[in-house]
Each structure stands twice: as structure tokens, then as C-alpha cells.
Amino acid sequence: MKILIIEDEDGTRFIMGKVAKNEGHEVKMAPDGAAGLALFKEFRPDMVVSDIKMPKMDGLQLLEQIRRLDNNVVVVIISSMDSAEYTLKALRLRANDYFVKPAMEKDLIAIFKKYQDILLSRTKEREIVGMILRKNLEMKVFNQLETVGKVVDRLMQEAEHHIPPADRLGIHLGLVEIITNAIEHGNLEITYDEKSEAMDGDSNAWENLLLTRMGNSPYSDRYVMVELKMDTAHCEWVITDQGPGFDWTKIPDPNDPENLLASHGRGIMLTQFEFDEVTYLGKGNKVRLVKRK
């Protein structure tokens, strides 16, 4: 993956670049937004990791310029404890994710791997012949996280021509997030605390936790149902897991900047920026996502 890192703090920029290179990525770096934009046009990265507060051109101005040039590049914002308002503005300008400084090496590796896996399973260019005016589709997804990217790519093949190009990457990432949550926290009933502990453990802790849950009843027999309903007015996805549900009323409000620093519910909050409606139904094991034309 080609990664462009734009950060005015020399030490932070060096560490992030070293981690990315050690993971096998091709890396370019810039010390400010203006230099970063020039390098972006030349390098054409798959991912941009950018600070918000920088000289010459700040991260928000840079993000606006990048989105005028490219809707497919993943943009991750480097935030800090005192820049939550700027982070919220960046997400509204179609940044895809963020992390708070100082980031641990394992957090950087995790975010690089997450988006590399998604981009590898995503078909960027498609030839669209004709237009489907109305469609209903149902898919059964088993508890295999490695297939989620391919499932979402298939869903996007059906609906993409109804979604503006500027919104397609965000919708794709949002569907990946919700289906992944349905498997991990719904079907397998892995709590956020259990996942955090496993991710903080040795290199095999998370994989061992997944394998244990997948191999035991009742988790092993569960699956996720994905329904797509599409017409000329909107696209609707209903994602249902077979877990016990959760109290969805406690999901942090994404429009409150302070909630961006919350330890739980971050993926769900990010998803809410991508759709016109995100509604949890019943006991919380069913979520309805709507994108209007």
C-alpha cells in the first residue's frame, strides 16, 4: 500500500514512517500541508495520514483539496486531546478515520492493516452497463471476518451506480464496519473490553479469542443476514446478527466532539457520518442503514 504521511512534528513523522515501512508499505512524508498536497499529486497514495494543525496549509484545507482530486483515497486524521472540534469538521469533510496522538505502534499497525485489507478487496473501477431501477437482495454471511471485504464489494457492485462517486468509499467502509461489528460483538458476543484486552496482549491473543468463540456453541452456528433494498429514491441495507443485542441508546452522539475521544463505539460513530439514516431496531441486533439519492 502507498502511504503519504503529513505531519509537522519531526519525531512523530519519523516514527509513523518507520512503522509503515516496517510493515512493507511504500511511504512518502511531508512536513506541512502545502508540501503534502504537492507530494499527493505526484505520489497518488492509497492512504493519507495527516495532522490537522500544521503550518502553510492545515489539515482541513488539505483534506478539501484532496477530496477535489480523489474520492478513493483513504484519509486518516491525526488528532489530539485538544483538537476534537477540528476532528469533527474533518469527518464532515469526508475524512475516513482518525487517531489521537500519541499513537502506539500497535495502533498504527492495526489501522494500516485494516485499510489495506479493505482496499485489497475493493474493486475501484467498474464498467456500468444499463441501470438497475429496483432490486431486493439477501445475503447470508458466516462468522468469517476475512470474507467481509468481499461481501461488501459484492453489495457495492449492486448499488454503486445509485451512490454519488464522492460517497462510495464512505458507504463501503461503513458497511464493512457494521457487518464486522455484527460478527464480533453480535454473533460472537465479544465485548469491547475483551477485544481491547486481546489486542493489547501477545500477537496471537486476538486470533485465539476469535477461534475459541467460533468453535463453541452457540456462537459457531450463527450467521449475519444482509438485506439490500434499492429503488430510484434510495438504497437501504438491513444487517441482522443472531446475538442477544445491546443497549444501542448508549451509543455516543457523533456530533458531540467530546465523544470522539470515547473508547467504545468509535466505529459506529464513524459510520453515522456516511449514511442519511442509521437506525437500530428491536433489541439492537438489527441495524438499518439508508442512503438517499
Image (cartoon, grey):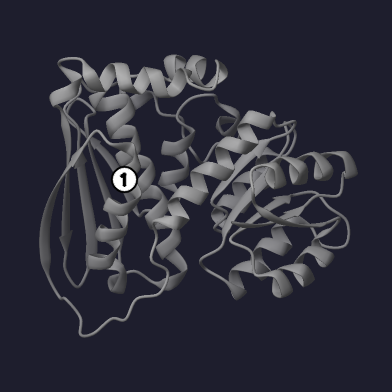
Side of 75 where 184 appears, left or right: left
Numbered marks: total: 1
Q: Nearer the viewer, residue 189 or 79?
A: 189
Q: Nearer the viewer, residue 157 or 121?
A: 121
- The N terminus is located in which quarter? bottom right
Whether residue 191 appears in this view of the structure is no
| Image quarter of residue 279 | top left
Can you identify the residue that label 1 sits on?
A: 148
Q: x and y percent of residue 6 in the render?
A: 77, 54
- The C terminus is located in which quarter? bottom left
The structure residue drawn at horizontal position 55% and vertical position 15%, both measured from the top left corner, is 201
Instruction: Classify 25 as above or below 293.
Output: above
Side of 169 where 84 appears, left or right: right
Instruction: Classify 177 as above or below 230.
Output: above
Instruction: Classify 45 as above or below 144.
Output: below
Instruction: Classify 145 as above or below 73.
Output: above
The structure residue drawn at horizontal position 22% and vertical position 66%, both measured from the top left corner, is 158
What residue type is disc 1 on? Val
Q: x and y percent of residue 208 in the render?
A: 39, 19
The structure residue drawn at horizontal position 72% and vertical position 63%, both measured from the top left corner, is 62
The structure residue drawn at horizontal position 49% and vertical position 39%, both measured from the top left corner, is 254
Which structural element holds mark 1? helix
